[in-house]
Image: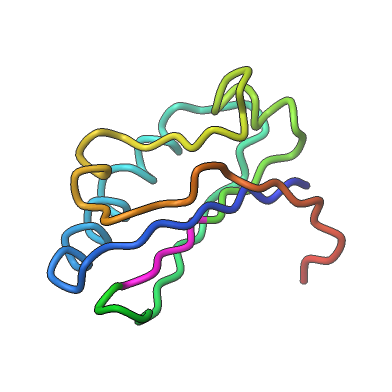
Amino acid sequence: MIARVWYGWTTRENAEKYQKLLREEVLLEIAHRSIPGYKGAELFVREAENDEMEFITLLRFETLDAVKIFAGKNYEQPVIPPDAKKLLKRHSERSRHYKVVALN
C-alpha cells in the first residue's frame, strides 16, 4: 500500500470553504473516477502559525502504478483542482509517497 501525502494551507477565513470543497466535491470526484488500486482518502486539519490552517491530504493506493494512473507520469506533482487552488494561501510543491508498513 502507498500513502500519497500532500500539504496545503489556507487563511482561517477560507478554511471552512476549502474543507467543504474537499469533502463534498474533490474527494468524491476522485472516488467516482474508479481508479484501479485507489483505496480511499483521509483529510486532516489543524490551526497553524501566521493565522493559517494547515490541511494534510492522504490518499491510499495499492501500488505506485495506481498513483501514476491518478496523477500522471509526473506523479510527485500535486493534483489541485482550480477551485481548490483559489482557496489556498500556499501549498507544498510536490506530493510525497510512503510505503505503508503497518495498518490496523
The quadrant where residue 39 appears: top right
The rendered magenta stretch, by its main secondary structure, is classed as strand
Tell me if 35 is positioned left or right of 103 in this view.
left
Extent of the magenta region: 53-57
Q: Residue furthest toward the top?
A: 73
Tell me if 2 is positioned left or right of 79 in this view.
right
Q: Where is residue 28 shown, x and y percent of the image?
A: 36, 43
Q: Residue at x 19, y 67 (%)?
A: 16
Q: Residue at x 20, y 51 (%)?
A: 87
Relative to 81, residue 68 above or below: above
Q: Residue at x 31, y 34 (%)?
A: 81
Colour scheme of the rendered structure: rainbow
The quadrant where residue 72 appears: top right
Q: Residue at x 55, y 55 (%)?
A: 58
Along the viewing direction, whichever of 6 and 1 lies nearer the viewer: 6
Q: Where is residue 53 shown, x and y percent of the image?
A: 32, 72
Q: Residue furthest toward the left?
A: 13
Along the viewing direction, whichever of 54 and 60 lies nearer the viewer: 54
Along the viewing direction, whichever of 34 and 27 lies nearer the viewer: 27
Q: Quadrant of the image for the C terminus?
A: bottom right
Tell me if 86 is positioned left or right of 71 in this view.
left
Tell me if 41 is positioned left or right of 90 in this view.
right
As for residue 47 lying within the magenta part, the answer is no
Relative to 25, residue 56 above or below: below
As for residue 55 lying within the magenta part, the answer is yes
Q: Where is residue 7 shown, x and y percent of the image?
A: 48, 57
Relative to 72, residue 90 above or below: below
Q: Residue furthest toward the front?
A: 50
The quadrant where residue 10 appears: bottom left
